Image (spheres, rainbow, N blue to C red):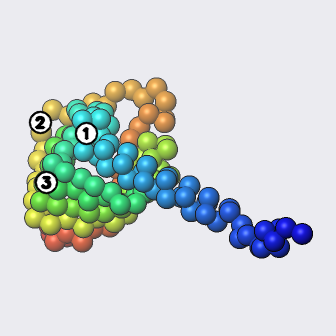
Amino acid sequence: MNKNALIHRPPRWPVVATACVAALYAAYLALGNLLLNSSIGHGLANRKPEKFVGSWSTAWTLYPGHLHLNDVRIAGHSGRMIWSVQADSARGRIALWPLLSKEVRVPRLIATGMSGGASLVDVRRIPPARKFRFQTLRLHLQWSRSRWLQRLR
């Protein structure tokens, strides 16, 4: 009788599953951080510069939906309102499911060194006629711990 046949071997599937999860996480870290710090990431954030413009110097993500940004600058134009916000750094969470329908939801945002403003312009910017509903982009800031934003309320 073969002695090796009597030795019980542990199942391999936990090792394979752990290796697959680790490989997926490493790929997310590499691709996510590369995207955030490349011109492609800036281009995706600024698809309609006549409505919304965002920029940052450096950014990183450790897990899906969470971002850390430095030297953040965003601005927009809606109707007769022109607004802009700047922050030294910002960290927050982006809801991932609404991104599939081209909707940006920011349920949590913490910013430091924040400033900004808004003003009315004489000429109202008329939005182009919408062909399809799924081409719109909505931005929701649901929660913020910024003293600057609290003063605006």
Q: Nearer the viewer, residue 107 or 25?
A: 25
Disc 1 vs disc 3: Cβ atoms closer than 8 Å? no
Q: Secondary structure at mark 3?
A: strand
Instruction: Look at mark 2 in the image and give the residue it sits on.
Output: 122
Residue 115 in the figure: left or right of residue 69? left
- Is the C terminus in the top left, top right, bottom left or bottom right quadrant? bottom left
Q: Which residue is farthest right?
A: 1
Amino acid type, label 1: Ser
State the CA–CA distance, disc 1 to disc 3.
15 Å
Instruction: Look at mark 1 in the image and give the residue it sits on.
Output: 38
Mark closer to the chain start, 2 or 1: 1
Foreground: disc 2 or disc 1: 1
Amino acid type, label 3: Asp
Disc 2 vs disc 3: Cβ atoms closer than 8 Å? no
Give the crowd class for mark 2: few <14, some 14-19, many >=20 residues within 10 Å: few
| Residue depicted at x 48% and y 36% | 134
Amino acid type, label 2: Asp
Disc 2 vs disc 1: Cβ atoms closer than 8 Å? no
Quarter-of-image position of residue 95: bottom left
Q: Nearer the viewer, residue 149 or 110?
A: 110
Quarter-of-image position of residue 79: top left
Tell me the tag on residue 71.
3
Mark closer to the chain start, 2 or 3: 3
Q: Which residue is farthest front?
A: 1
Q: Secondary structure at mark 2?
A: loop
- The percent coordinates of residue 137 (x first, y second) are 38, 41
